[in-house]
C-alpha cells in the first residue's frame, strides 16, 4: 500500500482527499494496490471534517515520514510551495501539483531536481483544470512537431465574458459568482489580468518546445479593458470576445507567446467554449489540429486531474522520466501570423491608414488581414489623430 500526503486543504486539496477516499476501489484496481491518504497539512482547523484526524500543521511530519512516497501540493503561490517541493524532491518523494505559478516559474529546476532524486514531478492539473492536456502532449502527440497551441485557458475570465455576453451581467457580479463557485484564484487579479493564462501558456510552450518559456517572456493583457460596447459591437458581426493564450514556433526555432483578448468568429472551434469551460487547440505537423475541451476550473474537475497523476505516479514510481524541458528557449518578440484586427477609437474616426477596412460603427472598425508589425505601424499613425480604446486580434 502506498501512502499519500496532501499539502493544503483548500478547494483542490479537499477535492483530492474526497476522490482518494470515495473512489478508493477504482484507484486500487488501476494501481494494483490500495493508496492510503496518511496526512494533510494545513494551518487551519477543520472541526468535524471527515479527514480531521489526518490533519497536521507541521510540514516535517510529512517530510520525515518514510512511509509517505507521494505528496500532493495544493498550496498555491511560490513561497512555501517552492521550498517544500524542493525539500520533498530532494528526499526522493514524488510531488504532484496543481500549482501553475510554481511550475511556470521553476519547472526546469524542479523537473531536474526530481530526476536527480529518482522522483516524479507531475502537474496535469496545472493547465485546463480537469482536461487531459499535459499527458496527451507528453505521450499521445509525441510523433508530432508541435507548431502552435492556442486556447481559452482560464475558467474565471471565460465565465465573466460569457455572463457579460449572454446575460448582460456586470463584470463585478460574474466575478463574485466565479469566486463563490471556487473557480477564481485566491487573488482574482491573476485571472482577470491574464497572469493565470500566461502561467498556463508558459507550461504548454515549455512542454511543446522542450525549453522553458518563462511567464516574464509572455506579453500579457487581461480583460479589464473589455466593455459592454466592445461585446455588442463584436456580436453585431458574429464575434465573441474571449481571452486567448497562444504560443507559436517560428521557422527560425524561436517561440512567440502572448495572452490577450480576441474576437473569435462563429466558425472557430473556440467560439462555443463558454462559462467555466476551457478549449485548447494543439497543431501538430502530422496530426493537424486537435482540440481539448472540458471544465477548466473547479474543485472536482481539477482534483480529478491531480488524482490521475497520483495513480500514474504510483504505477510507475520506480521509472522516473528525464526532465520534460530544460532552460534555454529562444524567445521571439512577434509573429508573422496574419489576422484581421478590431479597433475601437474614442471618437468618430477615419480608418484609411489601415488600407481596406470594415466600419462597424462611427468609431469602430475591422481591418484587412495584416501581420502584427504592419498593424502596429498603422496603429501608431492612427493614434496621432485618434484615441484608441481597444485594439484586438481576430481569430476567424
Ligand atoms: N483560476 C483558474 C481558472 C483556476 O479560473 O481557470 C484553474 O486553473
Image (cartoon, grey):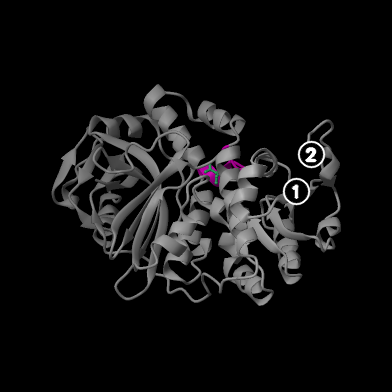
- Judging depth in this view, the residue of 159 and 301 nearest the camera is 301
Q: Is residue 50 above or below residue 215?
A: above
Tag on residue 51?
2
Between 116 and 358, the one lying in front of the other is: 116
Q: Is residue 199 above or below residue 343?
A: below
Range drawn in magenta: 183-192
Q: Residue at x 22, y 43 (%)?
A: 366
Tell whether position 191 is magenta: yes
Q: Secondary structure at mark 1?
A: strand
Q: CA distance from mark 1 to mark 2?
A: 9 Å
> Does any portion of residue 282 appear in the rendered image?
yes
Q: In this orientation, which residue lies closer to the viewer: 119 or 342?
A: 119
Q: Give coordinates of residue 172: x percent, y percent.
A: 53, 29
User: Please, what is the dominant secondary structure of the magenta stretch?
Assistant: loop
The residue that mark 1 highlights is 37
Residue 346 in view (yes/no): no
Contact between marks 1 and 2 (CB within 8 A): the answer is yes
Q: Is residue 257 magenta?
A: no
What residue do we see at 53% from left, 51% from top? 195
Amino acid at each position: 500500500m502506498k501512502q499519500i500526503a496532501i499539502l493544503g486543504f483548500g478547494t483542490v486539496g479537499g477535492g483530492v482527499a474526497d476522490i482518494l477516499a470515495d473512489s478508493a476501489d477504482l484507484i486500487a484496481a488501476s494501481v494494483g494496490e490500495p493508496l492510503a491518504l496518511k496526512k494533510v497539512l494545513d494551518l487551519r482547523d477543520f472541526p468535524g471534517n471527515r479527514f480531521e484526524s489526518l490533519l497536521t500543521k507541521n510540514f516535517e511530519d510529512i517530510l520525515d515520514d518514510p512511509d509517505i512516497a507521494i505528496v500532493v501540493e495544493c498550496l498555491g503561490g511560490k513561497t512555501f510551495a517552492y521550498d517544500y517541493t524542493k525539500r520533498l524532491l530532494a528526499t526522493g518523494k514524488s510531488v504532484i501539483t496543481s500549482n501553475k505559478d510554481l511550475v511556470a516559474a521553476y519547472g526546469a529546476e524542479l523537473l531536474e531536481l526530481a530526476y536527480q532524486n529518482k522522483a516524479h514531478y507531475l502537474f496535469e492539473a496545472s493547465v485546463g483544470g480537469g482536461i487531459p492536456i499535459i499527458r496527451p502532449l507528453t505521450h499521445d502527440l509525441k510523433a508530432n512537431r508541435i507548431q502552435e497551441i492556442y486556447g481559452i485557458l482560464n475558467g474565471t475570465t471565460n465565465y465573466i465574458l460569457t455572463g457579460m455576453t449572454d446575460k448582460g451581467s456586470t463584470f463585478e457580479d460574474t466575478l463574485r459568482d466565479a469566486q463563490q463557485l471556487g473557480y477564481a484564484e485566491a487573488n482574482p487579479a491573476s485571472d482577470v489580468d491574464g497572469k493565470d493564462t500566461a502561467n498556463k501558456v508558459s507550461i504548454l510552450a515549455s512542454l511543446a518546445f522542450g525549453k522553458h518559456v518563462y511567464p516574464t517572456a509572455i506579453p500579457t493583457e487581461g480583460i479589464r479593458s473589455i466593455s459592454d460596447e466592445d461585446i455588442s459591437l463584436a456580436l453585431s458581426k458574429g464575434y465573441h470576445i474571449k481571452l486567448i493564450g497562444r504560443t507559436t514556433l517560428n521557422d527560425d526555432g524561436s517561440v512567440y507567446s502572448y495572452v490577450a483578448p480576441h474576437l473569435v468568429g462563429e466558425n472557430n472551434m473556440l467560439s462555443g467554449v463558454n462559462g467555466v469551460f476551457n478549449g485548447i487547440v494543439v497543431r501538430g505537423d502530422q496530426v493537424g489540429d486537435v482540440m481539448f475541451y472540458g471544465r477548466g476550473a473547479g474543485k472536482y474537475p481539477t482534483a480529478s486531474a491531480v488524482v490521475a497523476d497520483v495513480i500514474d505516479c504510483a504505477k510507475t514510481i520506480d521509472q522516473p522520466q528525464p526532465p520534460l524541458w530544460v532552460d534555454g528557449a529562444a524567445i521571439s518578440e512577434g509573429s508573422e501570423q496574419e489576422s484581421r484586427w478590431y479597433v475601437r477609437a474614442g471618437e468618430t474616426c477615419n480608418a484609411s491608414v489601415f488600407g481596406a477596412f470594415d466600419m462597424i460603427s462611427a468609431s469602430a472598425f475591422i481591418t484587412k488581414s495584416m501581420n502584427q508589425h504592419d498593424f502596429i505601424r498603422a496603429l501608431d499613425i492612427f493614434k496621432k489623430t485618434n484615441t484608441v480604446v481597444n485594439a484586438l486580434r481576430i481569430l476567424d
